Image: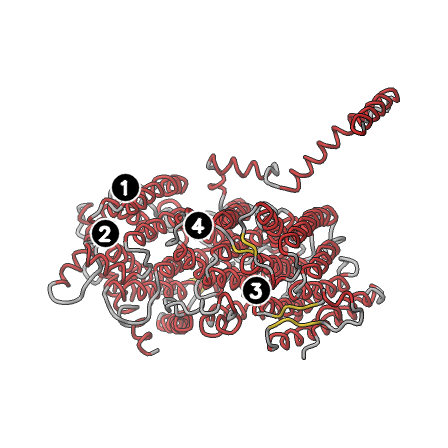
Amino acid sequence: MVNFQMMIFFPMLAGIILFLIPETLKAVKGIITILISVYILYLAFSVFSAASGLYQMQCTIPYISSYLILNVDGLSKLIVIFLSLFSFLFALYSYGYLKGKQSVECYYSYYVITIGAAMGAALAENLLFFIFCWGILGLTLYKLIKGHNEESSSAAKKAFILIGGSDSILILGIGLIFKLTGTYNISAINISTSGALANAAFLCLLIAALTKAGAIPFHTWVPDYVEHAPASSSAFLPASLDKLLGIYLLARICIQLFSLTAWATMLLMIIGSLTIICAVMMALVQHNYKKLLGYHAVSQVGYMVTGLALGTPLGIAAGLFHLINHALYKGGLFLSAGSIEKQTGEEEIDNLGGLSKLMPLTFFSMLVFALSISGIPPFNGFYSKWMIYRGIIDFGSGPDLVNKLWILWLGLAVFGSVLTLASFIKLISGVFLGRFNQKFAKIKEVKFTMWLPQLILASLCIFFGVFAATAILPTLFNFAPISGAQNLDGLWQSPQVSILILISIVLGFVIYAIGNIGKHRREDSFIGGENIQDETNFAPSDFYKTITEFKLIAFFYNAARKKWFDIYYLGKGFILGLFNIFSACHTGILSTYLVWVAAGLAIILLILI
Amino acid sequence: MTKEIFYFLVFPGLLFAGVLGGFLSWFDRKITARVQFRQGPPLFQPLYDFVKLLAKETILPKYGSPLTFLLSPVFALAGATLAAVFILLPVLGIESGFSGDLLVIIYVLNIPSVTYIIGGLASGNPLAAVGSSREIKLILSYELPFLLVLTSIIIKSGMTINLREIIDVQIAQGANIGSLSGIFGFITILMCVQAKLGLVPFDMAEAEGEICDGIMIESSGSVLAIYKLVKYIMFLTLPALICGLFFSGLELSGINILWSILKVLLVVLLITLIRNTNPRVRIKQAMRFFWVWMNLFAVISIILSIIGV
């Protein structure tokens, strides 16, 4: 018998106790956090090997015990194991990253509480217990950013308002579900999205899931958050944990809570495709590398939503596999970005360059992550994207309008993938390749505790890509609605291809050995006989200027710059507009107030009579 | 596994595609010379080029990332050979059990271009950066029409994404080029292939006269030799893909060998003639051309194939 409540309540309690240790002993707190996360990882493995089913937590108070039921099935096992893995890796990274840095207060306490709450949300059977844990996550999200730099507070407020708002909508949705079914237990609910109430409940839950995961139009907290948060929090929350939980909720909605009708599928497909394209177009023109990664964290959600919306076993498996892959490489990318930021202090791509020689390990891992997210075979991102594309093509033979539009979905997904590649070419070349800036001559590779998580994630990216069909999918993705989806008819044999690529690397070196590469010479760049000056440099951030010159695209970029698509600013504008109406009434002239009072009295009297 | 290694290194992979591609590149140069009233190179010139470059001294960039610079051609070779294997096995009708579908082919065909870009940027040369930015924008331009043409073919072949099955459908019902949608699709994919091969009018990434070979500017000696080999392989692979998609594949038996050679030569001839009769366009013009006109052609092709014309 696994001690499940330890997974949830032990970190929460430990986090509260960590508040008692003074901030000056940050290193001690860091080590305690790492130890806790190791213990949670160990517990997660025991959860993974436990039999599926419902588990009652031990509880002495009789009344609340019916809420404390845990649902251990394939999906929650998958989420739990990766939640704990990422918690461990990012705790290790945080130790090095936050050392000697004035940053977020009580970082580790909130970090540890987050682990517990995330476990609770992933394992909860009862929707009320679920919303309890889910709500704590919104609070720690807010606390894990504040105080990093001057603008952190406003970014934190924005994230908190959006997440908090979506949480209250989630509560409304849960209430509606209770009205429809009379139960809070997830495994007992299955509603068809046909009635008005059912549709409303579906939309409420959908908004909560999409806001957490960061899909358009509820994505706007993610880019701001990652720009102003410590890199370790960005990797921990928006890149991995919030994605895992948001998509987990979406998967529960699609697989279990609701059976989707054609219009719901259509809605999800539109959201998915728009998210892919719009976010990646925004990423293309960013100059700040953290913000660029933030927009990619949004764009990739589109693939997961698309995959889950397909509703076929292949599609759902693809969406979930992409979720895991995304957490691996995007977590890694944020860690690498944090390393660059810590060593150089620069956040603009234009000010960096030529770091590959100084930070070789970070360069290698970032290159692997970039190739993975761009879907270059045989890395993991390629495999899950390929599964999604296959899913879309299979989906195309269905009868509804949404099936008939498969070419649109496929085209947007593939095009989004190329745009991703384009923006990562810009990132890699701007930061690591290109001409070396003398300002950074003294920079060294980051410490062991920081590069180790990066390398682990990079090797997992390669491993998940090469052994996806033979090892990963059959073990991790072999549960009820999607089992058997991994038995594709073998048209992409990743292990064989990887061996061939290794052979060709050897072959390449043989060719270099035949050609006398040993007799090489190093020369400065040749630019047609002119002298190289600063002006001759072609900055990578100008790569895509041509694209912004097209009139239609320029229009959308301008609109985005004016924040027309930012639901936070739209909502703010709406509410401030309401304030204006009310403040117009507050003139300070007593006679006007008297008129209002008299009018109000008259209305009350009229109603009462 | 030995079977796969044979496919990869000998037939129809590295050796076969390299030699035949070299021959096609000679054909291209010979035709070009004839168009321009020149004599043209001898038959073995591509081989001489390759061997000569291997023997030359290699110059590595002083301010860049030499290791990345050296590894890029190697990965380009891996990607190109993989593409050759995945395309030529089904197009030649070899039963192998080792294959990739059209989606895999799309992605594998991009590997060489991506490695050119990374290699160019690793040299630290500003002109290479200009070339790289153009190359990536070119990929952005042609990727969507290329995919759309493939979906048109997928619809015509009854929703299969297996290249061999697509060819089998054509053998049973007549080649795709014979239909109206096929003609639109063929024009689109020919332009995409022109851009993928980096030939005039879409050679702005390498523009010799303007940015001194752009992404290739710093390549020399063995590095350039491998890039040349990659280009030979692509020069066979992409026309072979067109033959598979529109001319019911190639066959290596009896009189069919002649037909197969003629099909490939016809496609290469078209590519060569286009490159010899057009000026280089600017990158913005190329993007507009692909995004507006080629996408339009591809969509027409899709609509026609849904109707069944």
- The image position of residue B56, as x and y in percent, is 35, 65
| Residue indicated by mark 4 | A409
Assess whether mark 2 and mark 1 are in contact (beta carbons under 8 angstroms): no
* Color encoding of the figure: secondary structure
| Residue indicated by mark 2 | B176
Counting the numbered discs, the total is: 4
Write down the quadrant of residue A583 in the picture: top right
Above or below, B289 against A126 in this view is above
User: For the residue marked with disc 1, what is the amino acid?
Assistant: Asn
- The image position of residue A466, as x and y in percent, is 46, 70
Badge 4 element: helix
| Residue indicated by mark 3 | A328
Residue A281 located left or right of residue B306: right
Q: Mark 4, chain letter?
A: A
Q: Hey, which residue is sitting farthest right in the picture?
A: A590
Whether discs 4 and 2 lie on one chain: the answer is no
- The image position of residue A516, as x and y in percent, is 38, 70
Badge 3 element: helix
Q: Nearer the viewer, mark 3 or mark 1?
A: 3
Residue at mark 3 to residue at mark 4: CA–CA distance: 25 Å
Badge 2 element: helix
Residue B285 located left or right of residue A1: left
Residue at mark 4 to residue at mark 2: CA–CA distance: 25 Å
| Residue indicated by mark 1 | B278
